[in-house]
Image (cartoon, coloured by chain):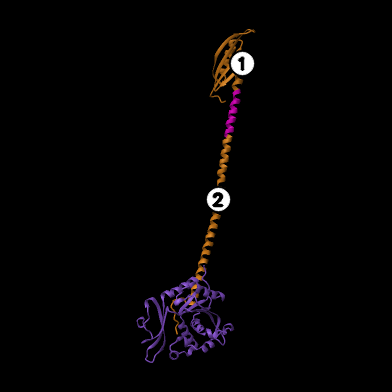
Amino acid sequence: MWLQPSTSRELVTISCTPQQLACAWIQPAQGAYPYTLRAYKRIALNRLELAQGKLCNATLIEKHISSFLKKHDLANAYLTFALRGPELYEAIIDAPTTQPTMRDIPVPKKLHHVWDYRYLYTNDNAHAALYVCSISQALLLQYKLMAIRQHWQLLSITTISMGYIHAYVHSHGAAFRHSKLGHDLARCNNRLDAIVPDMIIRRQLAVPTRYAAELEQEMPTITPLLGLTMSEHGAL
Amino acid sequence: MKKLTFIETLSPREYRALRRWYHVSLGAAGALLIGITVAQLHQLYRFARAQRAAARYALTATQPSQQHDTLANTKKSLEAQLAQLKDTASTAMLHTPLQACRAACGTTVRLNSYRQQHDTVICSIVCSQTGHALAMVRTLQQHPLFARAKITQLHTMQDSKGKFVQATIAAQLNPSTPV
């Protein structure tokens, strides 16, 4: 009560979609692989726990996450949530400037949403392609309340697409170029989920044998979680 | 690329710094509290010791008073004893007028009774002649112990042996004479 809870330097990334909840504990490592997957769990949500992206059964979601944290002794770890669903607005838009104002970006329900953007690349017509996303205040509050109730050390709440972008950026390292990102996005038809090739992830992440068999199937879920770990690595 | 997040949270570094600051503050507050407590306890200990010393000195200071009371009581009892002794002495002095009366009786007068009420002595005598009674009165009048000795009653009586005189003499004890 009197002492502040101790915090570990571990980071647990959690992705939430209406269909599934995935938790991953990824640690930076020394050696051939820069990161190691220490623990991973994906839970299919079949009982409308996250219907329409809303926390319809927060108790069950809390239970899933808490059991994962407890099992791996990560009660004091930092948590990062990556969300996707109807309650989130995500788009890649063209803007005449790389630093647009709120008026320049056509985000729906601006007053009821928290929104932000990131510059991706510059088009041939000198317009900037921006990744714009927003989340409803109500959903954000739900996640905040859940974190407060469970005494989780919440580090950030972002989108799964942002996890893909971070995975792409950090896997390229110093060789990252916005123009290359634009080229790759054009190649993938602006699908952020497809810009990170599995091969790059396999080079970055050491996967224990117990997860190796399912890696191919889990790659779309693990990739944004790894991207979030990469983005937070410097802060820890 | 800068990370994108919808919430403003403390970074782990800031959180650690806050936690460190909190613990240092808590430790400092605890140390301060302990210091204050120790100082207060020291003051309380000194106060208790001073109180004990004051009680001891108060006890020492009341001893002369107690001695005074004891001596006063002793004095009172001695005075009571002295008064009793004086009474006893005055009782003893009672015998002196009696002896004077007996001496005044001589061989001719027989002292029948002797009564002393305050400063008045009343003697009842029996003698063969009135003159003997008058002689006794004169003797008493000349005695320094008595003043105003006089015959209050005088009866001439007769029995089988013959006539005799029964007289009652009253005399005042001389107040100027030390008893």
Please name the residue that numbered disc 2 is placed on.
B55
Q: Considering the image in quadrants, where does the N terminus of chain B appear?
A: bottom left
Chain coloured purple here: A
**Is label 1 on the same chain as label 2?**
yes
Q: Secondary structure at mark 1?
A: strand
State which region is magenta: B79-95
x then y, percent, for residue B154: 56, 12
Work out whether residue A28 or residue A138 is closer to the camera in this orientation and state it.
A138
Work out whether residue B22 or residue A63 is closer to the camera in this orientation and state it.
A63
Tell which residue pokes out farthest to the left in this image: A103
Residue drawn at (48%, 70%), measured in percent from left and top?
A149
Please name the residue that numbered disc 1 is placed on.
B112
Residue drawn at (50%, 73%), measured in percent from left and top?
A60
Name the amino acid, label 1.
Asn
Position of residue B114 relative to residue B55, above or below, is above
Q: Quadrant of residue A85?
A: bottom left
Distance of mark 1 from mark 2, alpha carbons?
Answer: 73 Å
Magenta span includes B80 = yes
Crowd tier of the residue under label 2, counting other residues whose Cα lies within 10 Å: few below 14, some 14–19, many 20 or above: few
- The answer to whether the residue labelled 1 contacts the one labelled 2, judged by CB atoms less than 8 Å apart, is no
Q: Earlier in the sequence, mark 1 or mark 2?
A: 2
Tag 2 subunit: B
Residue drawn at (59%, 25%), measured in percent from left and top?
B91
Could you tell me how many numbered marks the image carries?
2
Q: What secondary structure is the stretch in magenta mostly built from?
A: helix
What shade has chain B been given? orange
Name the amino acid, label 2.
Ala
Q: Is residue B153 visible?
A: yes
